DNA sequence: TATTGTTATACTCTATAACTATA
DNA sequence: TATAGTTATAGAGTATAACAATA
């Protein structure tokens, strides 16, 4: 009832999923869905290491890479790539624009859609992040041999369709 | 400015991550992290199919299975298994208790911790869900052969540590 | 009529922090 | 002092809905 002090919030700490010894995981150990989740969390930690200090989350990274590789892409298409609603792509684009990473340019043919483009700053950031994220992704997956890594990628893509 | 009507919210629709044809995915195609994310979303759709009509999310499913297989487990341990904070395990347990799926029982030795147990209802639900979720998990992964599925599980577990 | 972007709003999930009771 | 549970609060992320401009 007495007023509490505001809680400072540090959001980007997805805790690793601990494997509790002695616990029975039952059917979970047979589910691809569960194994995927655990592996994804583990690899998120790699991403987090690579982007430490930046405010770049996985969806933001994906968005920047895709805009960089596909200049002029519309917000709606970007939303489809990320699997989020138009309004979310909008919020995301606002966030990039406020930080001068992406800019909206009117499209000649279509007065409705914007074309998204990296700024010079944005291109620079993407170039650096692509290197560090890829390197960290490989480092985290170093428990796998090169052939295993390739095979895992193949199987995941086959599964994702 | 004019007041808007409240938006009814149907949360559990993680959209599939569309593979936009003709788009350049650049470095994303070489990242395990990205491939894992796409595969995980695909498999979440299997989970969603299996639990349609129930209000059971993946963390809730995991929690119920683990409580079922480890009767008397504490809320804190459950939180560790799920990778969430104590307060989250608390909210989760409240949710289960309100629906008579799980009950808290005092532990004889320790006056602080609760022991969690499935109710008869809860045990029934878990029994059914284990079957349907496992079946749907296999159906979704049917693009993979049996050997590929085993290999994928092995690689994922190796990666997750 | 359909699509793009926009604004307003709502809800889930989960974090931090401070507190109480017990060990 | 340390741990389990609890309560209060905050914030990120993303959904739906309604709207305007354009096609």
Image: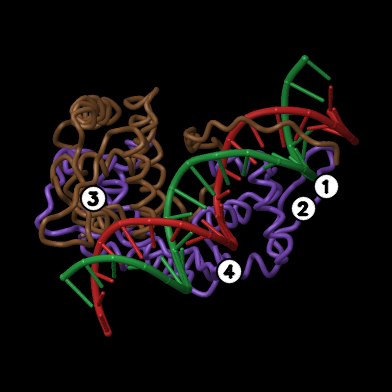
Chain colours: A brown, B purple, C red, D green
Query: Are the residues at dot 2 and dot 1 in contact (C-beta closer than 8 Å)?
Result: yes
What residue lies at 22% left-to-right and 31% top-to-bottom? A126
**Disc 4 to disc 3, how far (Cα)?**
40 Å
**Disc 2 to disc 1, how far (Cα)?**
7 Å
**Quarter of image, res B18:** bottom left
Q: Secondary structure at mark 2?
A: strand
Residue C19, x across and y down, in percent? 85, 31
**Disc 2 to disc 3, how far (Cα)?**
40 Å
Task: Evaluate whether label 2 is on the same chain as label 1.
Answer: yes
Residue in front for this viewpoint, B141 or B45: B45
**Quarter of image, res D15:** bottom left
Front: mark 4 or 3: 4
Q: Residues within 10 Å of mark 2 (few under 14, many from 20)?
A: some
Q: Earlier in the sequence, mark 2 or mark 4?
A: 4
Residue occupied by mark 3: A156
Residue B147 appears in the picture as rendered = no
**Disc 4 to disc 1, how far (Cα)?**
42 Å
Q: Secondary structure at mark 4?
A: loop
Q: Given the image, what chain letter belongs to the residue carrying mark 1?
A: B
What residue lies at 73% left-to-right and 60% top-to-bottom? B97
Residue occupied by mark 4: B6
What residue lies at 34% left-to-right and 35% top-to-bottom? A43
Q: Secondary structure at mark 1?
A: strand
**Disc 1 to disc 3, how far (Cα)?**
44 Å
Residue B25, x across and y down, in percent? 16, 46
Front: mark 2 or 4: 4
Residue occupied by mark 2: B104
Q: Residues within 10 Å of mark 3 (few under 14, many from 20)?
A: many
């Amino acid at each position: 009832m007495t007023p509490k002090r505001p809680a400072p919030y540090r959001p980007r700490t997805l805790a690793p999923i601990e494997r509790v010894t002695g616990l029975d995981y039952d059917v979970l150990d047979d589910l691809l869905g569960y194994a995927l989740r655990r592996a994804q969390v583990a690899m998120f930690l790699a991403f987090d290491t690579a982007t430490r200090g930046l405010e770049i989350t996985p969806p933001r990274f994906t968005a920047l890479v895709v805009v960089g590789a596909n200049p002029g892409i519309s917000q709606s298409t970007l939303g489809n790539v990320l699997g989020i609603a138009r309004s979310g792509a909008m919020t995301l684009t606002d966030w990039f624009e406020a930080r001068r990473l992406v800019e909206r340019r009117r499209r000649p043919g279509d007065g409705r859609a914007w074309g998204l483009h990296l700024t010079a700053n944005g291109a620079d950031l993407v170039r650096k992040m692509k290197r560090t994220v890829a390197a960290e992704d490989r480092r985290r997956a170093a428990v796998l041999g090169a052939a295993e890594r390739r095979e895992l990628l193949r199987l995941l893509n086959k599964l994702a369709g």
